[in-house]
Image (cartoon, grey):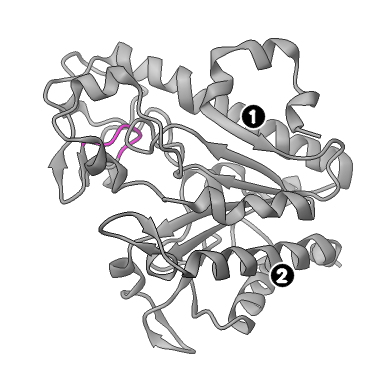
């Protein structure tokens, strides 16, 4: 049964439901919640009208096909939330008010976070750059436009994710969130692991043990290594907004970010999937089956 059955009819009829797709069973058979915040491919007309780059340049920031990689996990009992809007429209793995003041024609409110490292790099909640550092917009945006994007994309996605986690805790006493991403091969090459030296295939980010039980990170690490993947931890990615915001083991919610090298399944230049997509999808399915079976072992002794 689609998880929307447990949401209210008003939720289904609201414009916000277009921000994501949900795949889940009711009641949840496992405490697993899989999220893909960056695989969306929809770019609203109002954004494209203000853009100075073509849609293909915007797509370079997507975690292309990650939603397809994890979709079969629903059959193993994981609840899935999959973003629909492109990351360049609104980055769901950022604080919603992490905004670059230089992008706006009017002053931002005091609660806006305009001095973070991500904003400086052009990658705030509303990105300033795309592709090879090209400015996305041909004009300044207004804060009202930012508020509209938060209401259209960020707020409904995180409200739904929060409810999925609450359902998991209510049914199983714990929620286990896996936040799925992909990374450029160039970033994967920078990782250094004790087992493999320089370069990796997958990075596990648990905010250096703060966001989830080490049992969870260790289990995922061992399973992926057994499948032949080179796994790194917390470098170059330790986990973003989602991992930090939801990952509180003391409050019965564990969050782990998984970054997959795009070279495993994708032609980065054309964004076309390669033969590796099928193998990786199958392996993620195997990992999900292990997590669905062994999650009770992750509880504290």
Label 1 environment density (alpha carbons within 10 Å; few <14, some 14–19, many ≥20)? many
In terms of image quadrants, where is residue 44? top left
Q: Position of residue 129 (x, y in %)?
A: 20, 40
Q: Are marks 2 and 1 in contact (CB under 8 Å)?
A: no
Q: Position of residue 269 (x, y in %)?
A: 25, 58
Q: Which residue is mark 2?
A: 215
Looking at the picture, does residue 124 appear above or below residue 254? Answer: above
Q: Position of residue 119 (x, y in %)?
A: 26, 40
Label 2 – label 1 distance at C-alpha: 27 Å
Looking at the picture, does residue 14 appear above or below residue 122? Answer: above
Q: Which residue is mark 1?
A: 160
Mark nearer the N terminus (2 vs 1): 1
Residue 110 can be seen in this image? no
Q: Which residues are magenta?
A: 124-128
- Tell me, for residue 220, which label it has, or none: none
- Total marks placed: 2
Task: Please state if 211 lies on the left or on the right of 271 as rendered.
Answer: right
Looking at the picture, does residue 181 appear above or below residue 1? Answer: below
Query: Which residue lies at the image location 13% right of the left edge and 43% below the top edge?
Result: 134
Query: Which residue lies at the image location 29% right of the left edge and 48% below the top edge?
Result: 60
Query: Which residue lies at the image location 71% right of the left edge and 62% below the top edge?
Result: 288
Whether the magenta-drawn stretch holds residue 126 is answered as: yes
């Amino acid at each position: 049964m689609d998880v929307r059955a447990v949401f209210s009819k008003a939720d289904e009829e609201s414009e916000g439901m277009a921000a994501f797709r949900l795949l889940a069973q009711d009641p949840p058979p496992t405490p697993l919640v899989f999220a893909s915040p960056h695989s969306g491919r929809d770019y609203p007309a109002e954004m494209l009208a203000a853009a100075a780059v073509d849609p293909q340049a915007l797509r370079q920031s997507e975690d292309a096909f990650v939603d397809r990689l994890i979709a079969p996990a629903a059959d193993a009992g994981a609840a899935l939330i999959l973003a629909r809007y492109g990351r360049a429209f609104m980055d769901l793995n950022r604080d919603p008010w992490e905004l670059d003041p230089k992008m706006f024609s009017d002053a931002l409110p005091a609660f806006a976070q305009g001095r973070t490292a991500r904003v400086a790099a052009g990658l705030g909640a509303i990105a300033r750059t795309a592709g090879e550092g090209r400015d996305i917009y041909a004009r300044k945006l207004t804060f009202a436009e930012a508020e509209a994007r938060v209401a259209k994309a960020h707020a409904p996605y995180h409200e739904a994710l929060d409810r999925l986690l609450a359902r998991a805790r209510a049914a199983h006493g714990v929620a286990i969130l896996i936040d799925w991403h992909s990374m450029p091969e160039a970033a994967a090459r920078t990782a250094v692991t004790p087992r493999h030296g320089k370069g990796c295939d997958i990075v596990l980010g648990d905010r250096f043990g703060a966001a989830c039980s080490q049992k969870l990170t260790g289990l995922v690490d061992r399973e992926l290594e057994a499948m032949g993947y080179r796994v790194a931890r917390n470098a170059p990615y330790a986990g973003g907004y989602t991992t930090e915001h939801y990952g509180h083991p003391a409050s019965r919610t564990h969050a782990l970010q998984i970054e997959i090298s795009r070279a495993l399944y994708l032609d980065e230049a054309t964004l076309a999937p390669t033969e590796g997509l099928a193998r990786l999808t199958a392996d993620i399915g195997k990992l999900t089956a292990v997590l669905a079976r062994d999650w009770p072992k992750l509880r504290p002794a």
